[in-house]
Amino acid sequence: MKLYTYFRSSAAFRVRIALNLKGMPFEPVPVHLLRDGGQHRAAAFQAHNAQQLIPVLEHHGHDLTQSLAIIEYLDEIRPEPRLLPADPFGRARVRSLALAIACEIHPLNNLRVLRYLTDTLELSEEQKNRWYRHWVETGLAAVERRLAGEPETGRFTHGDGPTLADCCLVPQVFNAERYQCDLSAVPTIMRVHAQCMALQAFQDAAPAAQPDAE
Amino acid sequence: MKLYTYFRSSAAFRVRIALNLKGMPFEPVPVHLLRDGGQHRAAAFQAHNAQQLIPVLEHHGHDLTQSLAIIEYLDEIRPEPRLLPADPFGRARVRSLALAIACEIHPLNNLRVLRYLTDTLELSEEQKNRWYRHWVETGLAAVERRLAGEPETGRFTHGDGPTLADCCLVPQVFNAERYQCDLSAVPTIMRVHAQCMALQAFQDAAPAAQPDAE
């Protein structure tokens, strides 16, 4: 199985964590989002993903796209260890936490959006950075309220083992740290983050551990 | 079961479609996003959703959030008619199409983001509308390339019955039309949209059919 990846892409980071947690070996195919005018825009890559987005998982001749759909797929074909709980309410909770990051925070801060802000709207670097931090801090504060207030939170976001929600949370915290967001207001998130980063599967998935890291 | 909803919220629209397709009756609880400084920001609603977002589905004492997580939940507790195919590849495809809308288009154009553009960044109405149309047109063009090119596309986005992907596609087309986006470049999407809107379940979920419609 091949994973089209970019070391700094947090969507690819999510899938790398899931593959490592499942113990599924994969061949990383680096796609550099900045080089050659963006290798994800090249025809060779578009054949794998018409959306021109990272990551893509190639498996049995299929090109799977969208990190959350890929992780659900992995959980279906390799059920252990579970990345979604067995009960429908638990599954809904884990998915809603994953989506709270994947839909409410990350899309506002990816590369093409930041480029639109600076190139098309001609905003300053400072305005762009404020935008970035605003959505991260607002979004993580909402996740923190849930994690701190809901009894299902355990050592991880849901119970005592990592789930799909942790696969999304950790890359988002990496991004937040990179942009110097204020994380002092989200202690539960940081506790869970530390718990995750004690695991080899998360360490091996981190940007700096990738073959294409700079 | 209660659905906290706003007639114009496309995330709530997705869930209304799914509930109607499943034939599950629900009590709509209108939450007006513009009145009273935003009723979703009131303490009474925050008790249901710490993220202060619509929709919330209240079921058996649980508050379920995030439209895609809610629809997956409904598909688990009431499997017929299926909103996700049976095979893992098909499920991954449907989810990836749903996420292509829910993660790549919609988050950039919701109310709080548009407000940030005009209030915080002090952009003009024209710049805001260009931003809106840019992300809708770019995002739908990518979905169109997939629908037009992939053999799994049928009368609906996946095969000949509506799925989770159609629950996301139709509200996005409604938004696109409201903002006068150019939809001439996405004929497959418009064909599927028309197919969906021929069904009562989609008609009854539409903004204008809601009790809180203005």
Image (cartoon, coloured by chain):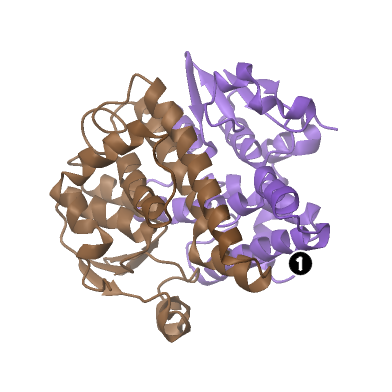
Chain colours: A brown, B purple
Percent position of residue B71, x then y: 50, 36
Name the residue rendered at 35%, 40% in the picture: A165
User: For residue A199, what is the image quadrant?
Assistant: top left
Q: Can residue B158 be seen by looking at this rendering?
A: no
User: For residue A158, what is the image quadrant?
Assistant: top left
Q: Can residue A157 be seen by looking at this rendering?
A: yes
Percent position of residue B171, x then y: 67, 47
Name the residue rendered at 68%, 22% in the picture: B28
Subunit under mark 1 = B
Percent position of residue A3, x then y: 28, 67
Name the kind of residue labelled 1 in the image: Asp
Q: Is A170 situated above or below B26?
A: below
B79 to the left or right of B55: left
Q: Is A46 situated above or below B29?
A: below
Looking at the image, the residue that sits furthest to the bottom is A36
The quadrant of the image that shows the C terminus of chain A is bottom left
Q: Is B5 situated above or below A21?
A: above
Q: Which residue lies under the disc numbered 1? A: B182
Name the residue rendered at 20%, 47% in the picture: A78
Between A99 and B199, the one lying in front of the other is: A99
User: For residue A194, what is the image quadrant?
Assistant: top left
Between B110 and B188, the one lying in front of the other is: B110
Q: Secondary structure at mark 1?
A: loop
A89 to the left or right of B146: left
Percent position of residue A1, x then y: 22, 66
